[in-house]
Image (cartoon, grey):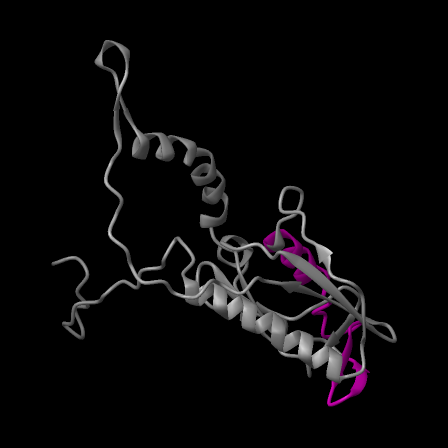
Amino acid sequence: MAEGIDPKKKKIMVKKTINETATRQDSLDTHNSSNARNDFYRKAGYTEDAPKKFDKVKQNQNDIDEMAYKSVDFNKDKPKTNVIRNGVSTKEALKPSDYAKQIDKHKYDQRDNVTQDVNMDAPMGRKDSRMQPSATITFRKGTDIASVDQYDKPADKKQVSKPKPKIMVKVKKAVVVDNEKKEKKQGIKDNEESEVFKKGSYFSKQHKII
């Protein structure tokens, strides 16, 4: 039997491919999502702390979101989470899918949670394990504290220009220096660091969201 063919439907099954590198649209989605959450908390009367720079060396947003997910009480018998719906707060147990939803290997939507308060009226935030925020803004109202990650707006699309010709320079012993090769060598470190974000979100590694 040929691989990739469903014997019942007799149709070729096409495997969906996931980009391992975030696209401009992915960046725009996270940026627009953080703006939508900022607007919600401001209109809802939350106080706002000054933006705090995100330390990309010591912090990883995917790890922060995983800890937040684990801090939410999903116990139906003894709910401890203060859930806000339509401006009214009650103690209830959330379903995992109410708090976070997986989109694909890298992308997921998740609510803001620092305390045991979850505002269901606030929009979910689009997260992407391939990208790190530039800053965070903390919003406060009563016992509810929400930390919203901020993502920079991606640059506007530019017209594709022709590649620059290689610059060949003759040196002693007829050694030729290739500037393009030199630039690639300098970019090795950046490529190695980017591999960390290609492994996928914590959902794809550990959790099955229902």
Res 78 visible: no
Which quadrant is the N terminus positioned in?
A: bottom left
Answer whether residue 79 is magenta in the image.
yes
Q: Specify the quadrant of the image occupied by residue 159.
A: bottom left
Image: 199 above or below 87: above
Q: Residue 174, image x and y in percent?
A: 22, 14
Q: Nearer the viewer, residue 65 or 164?
A: 164
- Say which residue appears at 67% left-offset and 52% top-offset: 54
Q: Residue 23, image x and y in percent?
A: 40, 61
Q: Nearer the viewer, residue 12 or 59?
A: 59
Q: Is residue 88 left or right of residue 101?
A: right
Q: Specify the quadrant of the image occupied by residue 81.
A: bottom right
Image: 40 above or below 101: below
Q: Specify the quadrant of the image occupied by residue 180.
A: top left
Q: Nearer the viewer, residue 124 or 181?
A: 181
Extreme residue toward the top, this view: 173
Q: How many marks?
A: 0
Extreme residue toward the left, this view: 1
Image: 113 above or below 89: above
- Say which residue appears at 25% left-offset and 16% top-offset: 175
Res 186 visible: yes
Q: Nearer the viewer, residue 167 or 64?
A: 167
Q: Is residue 6 left or right of residue 67?
A: left
Q: Residue 65, image x and y in percent?
A: 64, 59
The region drawn magenta spans: 62-91
Q: Residue 113, image x and y in percent?
A: 72, 67
Answer whether residue 122 is magenta in the image.
no
